[in-house]
Image (cartoon, rainbow, N blue to C red):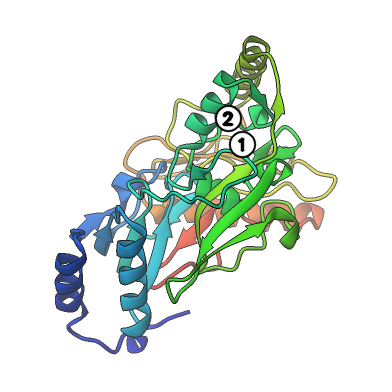
Amino acid sequence: MMTRAGIRAVGWKEGLSRLCTRVGCHPVWDEPLSEHTSFGVGGPADAFVEPATVEQLAAVGEFCGSESVPLFILGNGTNLIVNDRGFRGVVMTLKRLEYETNAATDGEFFRAGRPLAALVSSTVEKGLSGLEPLAGIPGTMGGAIFLNAGAFGRSIWDCLERVWLMFGDGGVEAFRASDFQPSYRDSGIIPGEIVLGATFRLQKCDPKEAAEVVRDYSRRRAESQPLSHKSAGCVFKNPAGFSAGELIEKVGLKGLNVGSARISDRHANFILNEGRSLAADILTLLRLARDEVRRATGVVLAPEVQVLGEYGLMEV
């Protein structure tokens, strides 16, 4: 993990400001990350940048690399817990990024910053089937690809054809999905590589029938999950042969609260922010659930959510 000693450029903010002026993007200083996550918790980022072009994205990325400034790429913040102290570096979001390619010959190209829900709706309206199980999953398409998001036994990589990645030096390359070996909630994409966009293998279908399938998945999700509260979805991956939520319920933690954070009464694999919760409260519940399940059953629960520390992603 990068430490404070790893940041060698004392005046990096001034350098970033000059760079952004030159390439046409505008950093926001001390931006509260609680406003950019579904949990609604977390301290400020030293700098927050929304690049609109690949050139801006590459320039800021190269700057952070050369100046040893921590950099974090934020999707929709729906699978993330940001620590209460915030992030001592640059956070970039790709929501405004416009990236197109003429190389997408095997299907329509979709940019990474597009909301996953909009992607599903768009393909269904065009009579293209395959992504319906992902309906209702919050987040961006790029984040879903990076984390191999899924639901109801399917994942986004089941339909992925190609993915476009940017590397630390600003270079962009397209890969076939078969170049990777994705696993449960893990794409195999190396941290630091940025998803720019993708194409999918989809089947032609009746738009009305596909829309009905989407409604059914959305209904099932609403019946089983506490969607009206702030959360980051399931906090743990389901271990092979088990349901994480059922294991947490089995050890009697359903409904337990720390401050304004609570393990959901409806689905024990959800932790809710029911007021002005701190990230520390949420992490206390997460660790307690993990430790109690391991003590009582021997099963080790692996977090599905990411935790952003002051200098980068951290182990829970």
Name the residue nearer the viewer: 9 or 302.
9
Tell me what residue is drawn at x 48 percent, y 79 percent. Answer: 1
Name the residue nearer the viewer: 243 or 10.
10
- In contact (CB < 8 Å): disc 2 and disc 1: yes
Tell me what residue is drawn at x 68 percent, y 49 percent. Answer: 237
Q: Which residue is mark 1?
A: 254
Q: Is residue 96 above or below residue 300?
A: above
Residue 25 in the image: x percent, y percent?
21, 59
Give whichever of discs 2 and 1 has the lower sequence position: 1
Q: Which residue is mark 2?
A: 265
Residue 220 in the image: x percent, y percent?
65, 20
| Residue 114 circle label | none
Q: Is residue 96 above or below residue 136?
A: below
Cα separation between marks 2 and 1: 6 Å
The kind of residue on which mark 2 rests is Asp
Direction from residue 43 to residue 204 in the image, left or right: right
* Residue 252 seen: no
Q: Quadrant of residue 223?
A: top right
Q: Secondary structure at mark 1?
A: loop
